[in-house]
Amino acid sequence: MLKVIENFVALLSFLTPIPIPKRFQLRELKFEGLFMLPLVGFLRGVLAVIPITLLAMVNSNAIYVAVSIAVAMHYFVQGFIHGDGFIDFSEAVLAYRFGANPHKVVKDRYKGSYAIIVFSILALWIYSTLLQLCLFYGLENMVKAIIISETWSPISMALVSYLSLEPPEGMGKKFKEGVKLVDIVLGIVVSSVITIGLADLHIFKGFIKIIFLLASLAISCLITHMLSSRVLGYASGDVLGFAHEITFSVIITMLIFGARLWT
């Protein structure tokens, strides 16, 4: 039991900016107990919606401000780690398309115009979908959608890593060494339980929602896996960050299309 707690706190220390006691901090980069990734995502989601909830208590009409805060908090609660990976790998994909060496681009610290463009598109995508959810289904449903999306997104990193070849170095290599099929299966079960519990759904409606979420996860991971296999040949840490951000965005988009089935 103590080992499980240590693994969970270690994941928190790497995937969030939450201060962690020194005894639980990672002494070396390794990942164990990855089935707990949805729990980390759930905690990040709860932290992300706290400012939105407080704002709604003060001024329930400040919808546009609330959505802007939601986008900002999405990146803050992850310590910007996945957003950075999304930018790096997106530039590598574009570099590959134009004949440049993607392996060099993905490690370049100095980002150019492509980085600005791809991140702007991602942020606008998230902002517009959250705004749509808020305007048509209310602030409460937007808050639930954020928590659900944050819960499911981290398991995409484990799935993409499991499907891909092992990188030669870095975080992606360590992640690959720690990921197991049982972690992915248990992670999906944990995500499903959290989703049904949070939404307080009838069993049939809950099943439909889980199908939508599984489809979103599968689509995002397959796209990421195909791109990473073609461009780099493996799933680096930046690829995993890309998978997380794409999964988050696809999930909140799919929640709009399927909302009428369970609201």
Image (spheres, grey):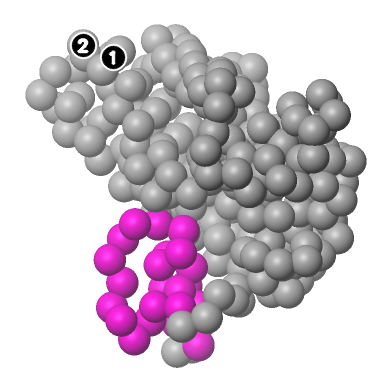
The residue type indicated by label 1 comes to Ile
Badge 1 is on which residue? 63
In screen coordinates, is 226 left or right of 219? Answer: right
Residue drawn where x is 39% and y is 78% of the image? 25
Q: Nearer the viewer, residue 205 or 51?
A: 51
As for residue 10 lying within the magenta part, the answer is yes
- Above or below, 111 against 177 in this view is above
User: Which residue is tagged 2?
Assistant: 61
Q: Which residue is drawn at 76% across and 53% down?
A: 235
> Is 263 positioned to the left or the right of 188 in the image?
left
Mark 1 vs 2: CB contact within 8 A:
yes
> How would you classify the magenta stretch by its main secondary structure?
helix
For label 1, count other residues whose C-alpha is less than 10 Å away and answer few (under 14), some (14-19) or many (20+). some
Up the image or down, 126 lies above or below 15; here it is: above
Q: In which quarter of the image is residue 19?
A: bottom left
Where residue 130 sits, quadrant-wise, is top left
Q: Nearer the viewer, residue 104 or 258?
A: 104
**Residues rendered magenta in the picture:** 3-26
